[in-house]
Structures are given as C-alpha cells and as structure tokens.
Amino acid sequence: MGQNFMTDAGVAEWIVGCLGIEEGDMVVEIGPGMGALTRHLVERARRLVLLEKDDELVEVVRGTYGAREGVEVVHGDALEFDLRPFFRRQPLKVIGALPYSVGTEIVRRWLENPSPVQRAVFTLQKEVCDRLCAAPGTSDYGLLSVRTQLWWEAEMVRKLPPDIFVPRPKVDSGVVVLKPRDRAGMPAFDGVVMDRMLRAGFSQRRKMLRNLLPPGPGGDWVDIAGRAGISETARGQELAVGQWVALVQAWQGGEVAEAQRDDEIFDVVDGENRVTGQATRADVHARGWRHRAVHIFVENVRGEIFLQKRSHLKDKMPGKWDSSAAGHLDAGEEYLPCAVRELEEELGIRTEPGRLRLAGAVPAGPGTGMEFVELYLTRWDGALRWPPAEIESGMWMSPGEIDAWTAARPEDFADGFLECWRVYRAGSGRGIP
C-alpha cells in the first residue's frame, strides 16, 4: 500500500511529543503499521484509537495493543472513516505517518471543515509538507496551501531523511503540525465560491488572475481588484489567505453581509406570549425581554438532521452548533411564515408552508434566551447554501449520534437548540412522515 515504516525510535518518540497529549485527550493514530509511533502513544494517551486499513497489519495491531485499557483498534480506511462521532469525543488529536500515495487526500479529508480535530501531527512526503506550509510568492504556494491555511495554521517542524524508513523512500519526509486557525481575525467567506475561485486561480500558475477567473457580479476586473486591494496584474500564488478572502468578497459584489442587524424590530410579548409592544433587537437582547422565534429541523432521506455551526460573527453563542435553521419573528409576523422565510434565508430552501410540520413549542425562559419558540420539521435532500456571516459550516448527523453528543458535551450547542432537541425527542422526534 505504499507504506514506509519508521525505524528510529528516538525520532518516533519526538514526533509523538509534538502532539502535546494531555489528560483527557482522545488520540487517533492513522496507520499504526508496525507500531513505531504506537508504542509511545500508549504510554501517554489514556484514550487511543488505532485506525489500520491493511488486513494483515490490523491483526498484528490487535494482538499487540488490543487488550490494553483505553485502546480501540479499528479496521478501516482513513479516506472513508466517519469522523462525526468524534465531535463528542473531545479534545481530539490525530497523528500518523501517512503513505505517500494518499497522504494529501487523508490530510484534506480529516481537516475538511467542519472537522473535530483540534491538533494534528502528520509525517508526509517533504514536498507535501512544503506545500501545506508555504508562504505567498514561493514556488510551493498553491491550491493546497490556501485551502489548508484558510482553516489551519501549518508548520513543518522537522525534516526526516530516507534512511530512517523501511523500505527506504527515494525522497525526504517531513513532520507537519496543524492546529485550527483562530476565526476571530478572519472575515467570513462563501466556501463554495472560494473553492471555485481557487481552482480557477491556480489552474495555470503563470497566468494573471484577470485571465483565469470567471466573470462575477462584482463588476469588471479593475473594480474587483480595486475593492480587494490587490494589483490588477496579480497571480494566484502572490495572494495571502486574507487577500483571497477579500478577492472573493469583491468578486461577489462587496463584503459579506452582517450576521445580524441591531435595528431589526421584534414584537415584545408577556408571559402568556401576547404582544405588548415592539423594540429593536439590541434592546430586546440587552433588557432580556420576551420575544418570539422559530427553529426548524431539516431531515434527509437517511433520517439524519442537518446541524449548523454558528458563525464567529454572531452576537450570541458564536461558534456553537444549532438547529438546521432558526430566527426571530419580525414585528407583526406569524410563526409559520417566519419558518418558511428562515429556511430560504439560511439554507436556500424554498418550500411551501404545507411542507413544514409543527413539532412542538418551547416556553420563553433562560434556556431559549427568553424566546417563545415554535419548532418545525421538514424534509430536504437537495443542495444547501448558507450566508457565511450567519453560518460557518454544517453537517448531517443521525438523531442517535446527536443524543450522544448533547449528553457528552452540551456546551458545544446553543441553548435554544438543546431545548428544542428535548422537545423533538420527547414528542414527535422519530422522523418526518
């Protein structure tokens, strides 16, 4: 399978040290092979998953480490492995000496947003390490560099010679450490548009971006480059990650919309959910007044629920996981029309009111942010698109897995979601007819 096994115990121990294992960490080793890293991991990690694809090697791994307390041996392919259960098994750290043939694909698969990984240490072909960590303007800087650095800080911490591996590879290897990028300093961006622009912008490295990027709603190239603050003759490899974000925003016609507006007008209600007046969002939240909101759970054909991860730009509970869609009722608005509107605004789902089913109601209280909530259910199997200022990312997850996650780590979720999830599971939360 293109594997090269490490033989230097000192180097292996040093690489494991780069993972910074602490008590309570969940550690996954991809491809333990003959155990060069594993023998040091079992001494440091109290919870360890050993993921091995090779049919024969997995039996060796089981025989050597399978009986150890806290060690789980999994026979599986890292490119097909389901990472979703690890959102509840945090903090998650990943390590592996990856096969040269699929190393890049494994890195992309495990670090693709949203990822449960909090830190990763990979041994890879040095050329791949160089590309992951490359700076703008260098020959190694390209599509892989920007895709990775949009979400991760990458650093190559050591070069490894061929003679510490068997069989001996023909090229040098490297050790790269990756940790999530702090979102606070990063503007929101449309991930779908970004990826399309990156693929076009790096398709021919010697050409200028104005000759590679498709026409967009942001005007002609001179206007787009001016708003993005880049040269009209810029090439893809010259732009830092932040400049790529600015370029995507300019190409789309301007900056990403705000996550919310403080001057929106809501109905203020009493303890019986009767309207007593109107006030701005800012005043309603600042004064803790009761108001109204909807939450919607969207289910697919497999019975999974879509969860959204709130943008870091949100004023309340940024970065928390939440219902498929949710939002406040505008002044004078009824619950069902609000649910239809929020589905389109947040997920790009256009549907009729008759396609939504009322699943229950949640009274206003601290757990809902003083919102009287109506919860609706609907089914959707098409594509989803969301405003990046509102939603950072999302994923489909089975109700059973959500049960396990909310029980293990309720702090990962928005308060209103937890209240709605209890109503869903206690009542009609067994699927949508």
Image: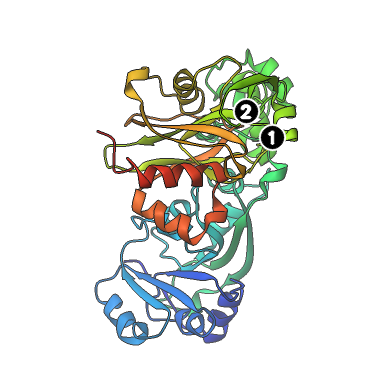
Quadrant assignment, res 75: bottom left
How far is disc 1 from disc 2 in space, using C-alphas? 48 Å
Secondary structure found at label 1: helix
Count residues near mark 1 (Cα–Cα under 10 Å), then give few for <14, some for 14-19, many for 20+. some
Q: Which amino acid does label 2 sit on?
A: Asp
Q: From the viewer's side, name the closer residue of 96 and 207.
A: 96
Q: Quadrant of residue 212?
A: top right
Residue pointed to by mark 2: 270
- The residue at the point 50 percent across, 74 percent down is 162
Q: Can residue 83 be seen in this view?
A: no
Who's the residue at 35% across and 58% down the image?
Answer: 81
User: Residue 186 in the image: x percent, y percent?
Assistant: 68, 41
Task: Give the residue at mark 1.
Answer: 243
Vertical side of 280 occupied by 306: above or below = below
In front: 367, or 153?
367
Q: Where is residue 214 in the image (x, y as percent from the top left)?
A: 52, 20
- Kind of residue sitting beneath label 1: Gln
- State whether residue 261 appears in this view: yes
Secondary structure beneath disc 2? loop
